[in-house]
Image (spheres, rainbow, N blue to C red):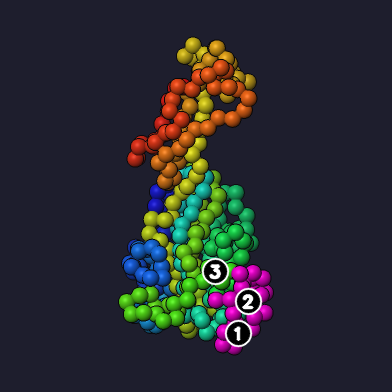
């Protein structure tokens, strides 16, 4: 968990979040194939196998998740489900992840379409999944879920039928740009023969509201050739735009008439600008720009430096022009 979110009610496969489970572990790099060095890894098997090859079967798999069934188009085995509630302190959240699988490269475009999803529900969200959730584990710029048959090397393998991938993602060949071939699986590195590049899950939320997220992954059709998802440490954070609030004054007194509370009158009033960086926004410097027909120096005077630097851990800031 990163900046700008408060988290409660963490569970994994129905267990309290502080209980160990072989399907969830700490990932530490470095890796030639994953470009972040620390995070959680959750998988459809004992995640010790991430470093040492195929692991043993899970001892406490989750019940078949209906949302994963919908994405995979088949029954789901060995599910791993991490979920929690969070309070956002800004207008959007995002985090980074990598999906990886032993189904690559031999079972592309088959029924073994191991799937996962990040299912977000809460105020302002309406989607087709449980609790009106929407899935935010998507191919960049699309509404297509990331899965074996939607992101791969761009060719059917083994007994795979290209039509299966075409049906799942009409742009599956072009979207092979998001696939990383790790077929050599060098010793000491991640032992998955294929994975995605680092992708970002993101969504708009309402500041100050509670949301629920379910991060789930499962084996499709069978329980063999497991899959996993890596979640970058500290990347689950609330982000938003830097905001500007203008408060006019006349003779030092605030303007309370709503017809004029965002208006400046030449030669009569001045204004305080509050420049607000929401929690979690990694912005250190901004530049204030003006537009319109008013001419600086003739119609108004701006007395502050237009480039402003936020000191670490100190916001909001204000100045008087």
Badge 2: residue crowd in 10 Å (few <14, some 14–19, many ≥20): many
Q: Is 169 part of what is drawn in magenta?
A: yes
Nearer the observer, 237 or 84 = 237
Q: Dot 3 surroundings within 10 Å: few (below 14), some, or many (20 or more)?
A: some
Q: In this view, does 93 lie to the left or right of 48?
A: right
Residue that carries the numbered disc 2 in the rendered image: 165
Does residue 62 appear in this view?
no
Residue 114 lies in the magenta-colored region: no
Give the mark, 3 or 1, whose residue is nearer the N terminus: 1
Q: Is residue 260 above or below residue 224?
A: above
Specify the principal SS of the magenta part.
loop
Q: Which secondary structure, mark 3?
A: helix
The answer to whether residue 259 shows anywhere in this view is yes
Position of 171 compared to 288: left or right? right
Q: Which quadrant does the N terminus fall into?
A: bottom left
In this rendering, would 7 be left or right of 204?
Answer: left
Which residue does the numbered mark 3 point to in the structure image?
177
Identify the residue shown where x is 36% and y is 79%. 186
The residue indicated by pointer 1 is 160
Question: Foreground: 213 or 13?
Answer: 213
Give the magenta part as a residue range. Answer: 153-174
From mark 3 to mark 2, how far is it between C-alphas? Answer: 15 Å
Q: Report, in whole angstroms, how far the alpha carbon at label 3 lies from the one at label 1.
A: 20 Å
The label nearer to you, 3 versus 1, is 3
Q: Are marks 1 and 2 in contact (CB under 8 Å)?
A: yes
For the residue carrying disc 1, how many other residues have a C-alpha within 10 Å: few (<14), some (14-19), or many (20+)? Answer: some
């Amino acid at each position: 968990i990163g900046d700008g979110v408060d988290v409660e009610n963490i569970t994994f496969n129905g267990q309290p979040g502080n209980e160990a489970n072989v399907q969830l572990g700490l990932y530490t790099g470095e890796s030639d194939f994953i470009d972040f060095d620390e995070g959680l890894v959750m998988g459809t098997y004992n995640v010790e196998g991430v470093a040492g090859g195929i692991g043993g079967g899970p001892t406490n798999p989750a019940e078949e998740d209906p949302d994963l069934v919908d994405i995979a188009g088949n029954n789901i085995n060995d599910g791993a489900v991490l979920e929690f509630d969070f309070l956002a302190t800004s207008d959007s959240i995002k985090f980074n992840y990598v999906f990886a699988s032993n189904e690559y490269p031999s079972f592309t475009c088959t029924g073994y379409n191991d799937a996962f999803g990040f299912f977000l529900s809460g105020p302002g969200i309406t989607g087709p999944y449980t609790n009106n959730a929407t899935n935010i584990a998507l191919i960049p710029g699309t509404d297509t879920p990331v899965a074996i048959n939607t992101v791969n090397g761009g060719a059917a393998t083994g007994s795979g039928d290209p039509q299966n991938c075409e049906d799942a993602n009409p742009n599956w060949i072009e979207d092979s740009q998001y696939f990383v071939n790790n077929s050599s699986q060098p010793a000491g590195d991640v032992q998955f023969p294929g994975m995605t590049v680092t992708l970002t899950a993101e969504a708009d939320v309402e500041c100050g509201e509670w949301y629920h997220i379910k991060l789930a992954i499962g084996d499709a059709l069978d329980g063999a050739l497991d899959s996993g998802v890596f979640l970058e440490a500290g990347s689950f954070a609330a982000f938003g735009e830097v905001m500007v609030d203008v408060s006019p004054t006349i003779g030092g007194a605030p303007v309370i008439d709503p017809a004029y509370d965002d208006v400046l009158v030449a030669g009569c009033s001045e204004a305080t600008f509050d420049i607000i960086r929401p929690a979690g926004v990694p912005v250190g410097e901004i530049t204030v720009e003006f537009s319109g027909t008013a001419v600086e120096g003739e119609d108004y005077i701006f007395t502050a430096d237009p480039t402003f630097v936020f000191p670490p851990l100190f916001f909001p800031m204000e100045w008087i022009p």
